Amino acid sequence: MDQLVALLGYEFVQNAIAAGTVIAIVSGVVSRFVVARNMSFAVHALAELGFTGAAGFILLRLSPVLGLLAGTAVTAVFIGALGVRARGRDVVVGVVMAFGLGLGVLFITLYKGYANQAFAILFGTITGVSRTDVLLLLVIGVVTLVSLAAIYRPLTFATVDPEVAEARGVPVGALAVAFLLIMAAAVAEAVQVVGVLLILTLLITPGAAAERLTPRPGLAIIYSVAIALLCILGGILLSLITNAPVSVFVTSLSFGCYLLARFVVGPRRRDLRATSGHAKSSAGAAVAQAR
Amino acid sequence: MGSPAVSFERVTLEYGTRRIWSDLSLDIPPGAFVAILGPNGSGKTSLLRAILGLVAPSSGRILVQGRSPHRGDPEIGYVPQHSNFDADLPFRGRDLVQLGVDGHRWGIGWPDPTRKARVDRAVASVDAEAYADAPIGRLSGGEQQRLRIAQALVGDPRILLCDEPLANLDLRYQQTITALIAAWRERTGGTVLFVTHDVNPVLGVVDQVLFVVNGRWAAGKPDEVLTSERMSALYGSHVDVVRVHGRIVVVGESTESGFNIEEPHHVPVPVEPH
């Protein structure tokens, strides 16, 4: 315990905790929409092409964080321009991702410096962030959350009920592109903790666990943020104690949260079942099936 | 009667190179309950989309309450074709209804007692209180449909567009949903355009039918349109309109284009005892 308190005095630990908190809030909120819009594959592609962007920026001796952001943003624009509709979107994502990752390989080959910067982007480097990085992550995080708050209602409408949303004048296509850009920023943030390869543990799992805990959309976002905070801050502390990499603990904690939500806590919650007295058969069957 | 709620002036609608409707002229008076009938693929949904301002006619003019259709018209309520909600989606029936109040507005939309009261009233008006707090994806088709109607009506529209609202419902729910919509029309004097492939469940409340087949159309009172002569002319082949046990059945051979007439398919299902 004393050892832990002593560790908290180090600047790199404070930076990690500050950055981790910002990233957890962003990931928790964004992952709810990633899950509801079924966009796991797009998240994966954004992360891998974020790697390409970071590798390119390292080659040019620029900030890898900005490189990540550039990579994910360009990818978001490409995916948005080529295929916004759900059908065919995965194909477009795959096509763009394959090409972009090829470029990343080229950049890493050209780079004559240390390979550990590339390794950090692949597996996360939260305990290595500087004060400047923390500020940059904070700015990106605030911009992301403010943008998401601005489009929250119509994005929810377009996600849950696209036909009626369109009829009510909601710009469904433009919102899909806007959300891709928000995802691009969230991916650039989350990569700092778990790296490109493990990105889904922060941008899918908290949102997926949260929806097992409540039928209320707003509360699901709060639960998702809480789970992301637990995973990241817990992961950082466990890593400090054990010296094993942060991503190992973050992925384990988030997987544990998901299993707990899905098989232990969720099934006990009454309000997650259909409470109707009508049409017992079909609603009951749905509940039985989901168990 | 005043000016028509919806009027079509020589409207032609094309989808790509395919002509869906040609030369449709029809005035729908306010307060009318119009059933839009026809086989699958005859452009019934496209007609609703044109009224919503989502597709523009290639020629002619559509007027909704005297104005050109525009997206997001608050005077129109819309019940889309049956859609499936994910069983685990954290979204309740009341959240779906709430989208009808302010889902199109920007911002977060923090909890608001006025809005909650409106949603509660809309939920109560379709008798959905018992399950409005359950996840929408866990409800039966009929329960979801009631909430869809509450969503469409919560904004107090003057015109209600329903796209196959009775599809996938058992007979009892077909009657309930029809009664809910008819009661809304009685109460508010609103206009209903009701797309369906089977006229029978709504026969008691409909005062006009619009029947479309292959771009051709016929409109008028059900007794005038749903006759062997009119239907044969419309399909371009011999068609019989038969009345059995107070129900109307349209029966025919395939037309020269190989287009089969879709018969009203349901047989009365015994109501389950409670």
Image: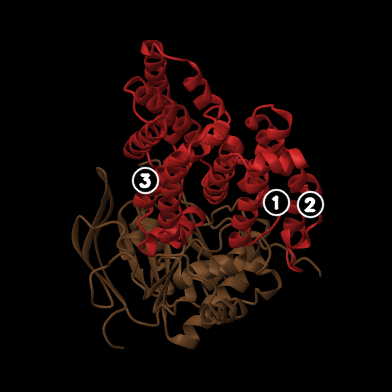
Which residue carries the number 3 mark?
Answer: A177
Same chain for labels 1 and 2? Say yes or no.
yes
**Which hue belongs to chain A?**
red
**Which hue belongs to chain B?**
brown
Mark 3 or mark 2, which is nearer the start of the sequence? 3
Same chain for labels 2 and 3? Say yes or no.
yes
Q: Position of residue A208 (x, y in %)?
A: 64, 45
SS of the residue under disc 2: helix
Q: Label 1 vs label 3: CA separation?
A: 28 Å
Amino acid residing under circle 1 = Arg
The chain that hosts pointer 1 is: A
User: Looking at the image, can residue B240 be seen?
Assistant: no
Quadrant occupied by the N terminus of chain A? top right
Q: Position of residue A16 (x, y in %)?
A: 57, 40
Q: Is residue B162 found left or right of A241 in the rendered image?
A: left
Which residue carries the number 1 mark?
Answer: A212
Residue visible at 60% across and 39% down in the picture: A10
Mark 3 or mark 1, which is nearer the start of the sequence? 3
Q: Is residue A88 found left or right of A270 in the rendered image?
A: left
Q: Is residue A247 found left or right of A151 in the rendered image?
A: right
Contact, mark 2 vs mark 3 (Cβ under 8 Å): no
Residue visible at 40% across and 57% down in the picture: B45
The chain that hosts pointer 3 is: A
Mark 2 or mark 1, which is nearer the start of the sequence? 1
Amino acid residing under circle 2 = Val
The chain that hosts pointer 2 is: A
Q: Position of residue B151 (x, y in %)?
A: 51, 70
Amino acid residing under circle 3 = Val
Q: Label 2 vs label 3: CA separation?
A: 35 Å
Residue visible at 42% across and 28% down in the picture: A49
User: Looking at the image, can residue A15 be seen?
Assistant: yes
Q: Position of residue A143 (x, y in %)?
A: 40, 52
